[in-house]
Amino acid sequence: MKRANLGPSLILIGLAAFFGFRYFQPPVQSTPHLIFAILFAGSGLLGLINLLPRRWVNIALNVGISLFFLDFVFAEIDLREVGAALAEANYLMLIPSTIFVILHMYFRTLRWQWLLKPLGEVSFWPAFRGLVIGITGNALLPARAGEFIRAYVLGRRTGLSKSGIFATQVVERIFDGLTVLLVLLAVIIWGVQDEVLKTAGIIGGIFYVGAMAALFLFMTKRHWIDAIINKFVPQKWAEPVVGLLDGFGSGLAVLKNPGQLAMVTLWNMLTWVMIPISFWFALQAFDFGVAVPWQAAVLMLPMMALGLTIPGAPGGVGAVQAAVKLTLDITFAGLAVGPNFVETVAAATIVIHASQFVPEIIPGIASFFYEGLTPGDISAGRSMASGEAG
């Protein structure tokens, strides 16, 4: 048995058991649950005996995870009421929501420009196109391949070190993670007491503090790493690996410059203030029977960020819906909500997902064609991590 197929195949069998269990739950035996149970059981068993290629096992797994979360949102509710909530929504509120998503991308591009300064000056539009191409790649391709494609695209356009560019994205992700944790902490302190949120905050804090410690060790004790590589890695591989680390290290130089770091911090704050405001306007499109609490829009930021770390169908379908529903269930708890609150929440998960992803993916696709990229460039970007040192 191939170990690569073992874990995903066992998860598929677990998903089949879940959908089989759901099929036998009252009051109605749902035919889709039975179909999903059969399909995922078959995919899992074929994967275990190596009759289903790894690629198809992973596709089945991603689809299964998304369906699992969609079941959490849409099972056992009146879909006609969901349609009614969608029909009655005030879509004019998506105009300001979209404006703040665009502002988010603007400030995020400025932040990246400052992160790139130690490598060289990069003008706004090449950085913006690289950013939105990367976002689109993350949304549509597995394993967050957009991160590597983004570094490849900007490196090809500017001639800068692709590994150095990728290092700036590592720093960017740490800023993102710490910001999300601070937002989560603020929501917990000022209004939402939930043990699951506290646990998530602790786990996330450990991870990002560990990442910062690893980067600090890399920058201050680089000679240790080079010595280990030269001692244990064959000479024909050691030199390219050291070269790759040189490029990576150049992208971390911003962490040593207080002035540049201050500017990155400023643009980081403005970047992430925009998203909760965008959420708030999108939530105003729906009638929940009570005013939307401020905690809903703020908590949605870390919840959606967490949801997008879970593998699944392209664009986070399923995981995003579950994150939005969980956010609204927590923040509206105890309030005098309307009689069709559950269905309205389900409708809101669809609209909020689209309101955040469409304004990012459309310019990403347009930038893909503007840059003259081909499927071969996508493959080159996805394989960059294992082959590019300059």
Image (cartoon, grey):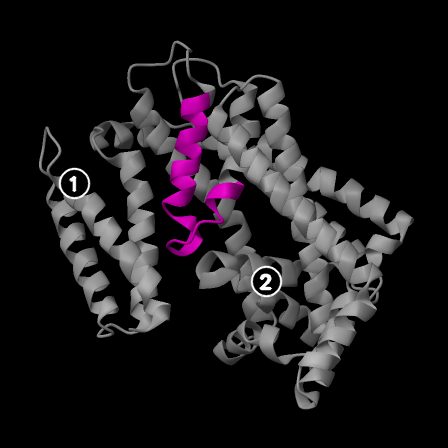
Q: Secondary structure at mark 2?
A: helix
Q: Secondary structure at mark 1?
A: helix
Q: Is residue 288 at all visible to an observer of this figure?
A: yes
The correct choice, above or below, for 193 with respect to 235 in the image is above
Disc 1 marks a residue whose amino acid type is Phe
Q: Is residue 375 magenta?
A: no
Image x and y of residue 220, in percent: 84, 60
Q: Residue at x 71, y 77 (%)?
A: 229
Image x and y of residue 46, in percent: 20, 68
Image x and y of residue 202, in percent: 58, 35
* Outermost residue, bottom side: 236
**Camera-nearest residue between 267 and 329:** 329
Residue 268's label in the rendered image is none
The quarter of the picture where residue 244 lies is bottom right
Read off the residue under disc 1.
Answer: 21
In the picture, the quarter occupied by the C terminus is bottom right
Q: Residue at x 40, y 24 (%)?
A: 329
Q: Is residue 325 magenta?
A: yes
Read off the residue under disc 2.
Answer: 147
Q: Is residue 390 at all visible to an observer of this figure?
A: no
Q: Which residues are magenta?
A: 305-330
Disc 2 marks a residue whose amino acid type is Glu
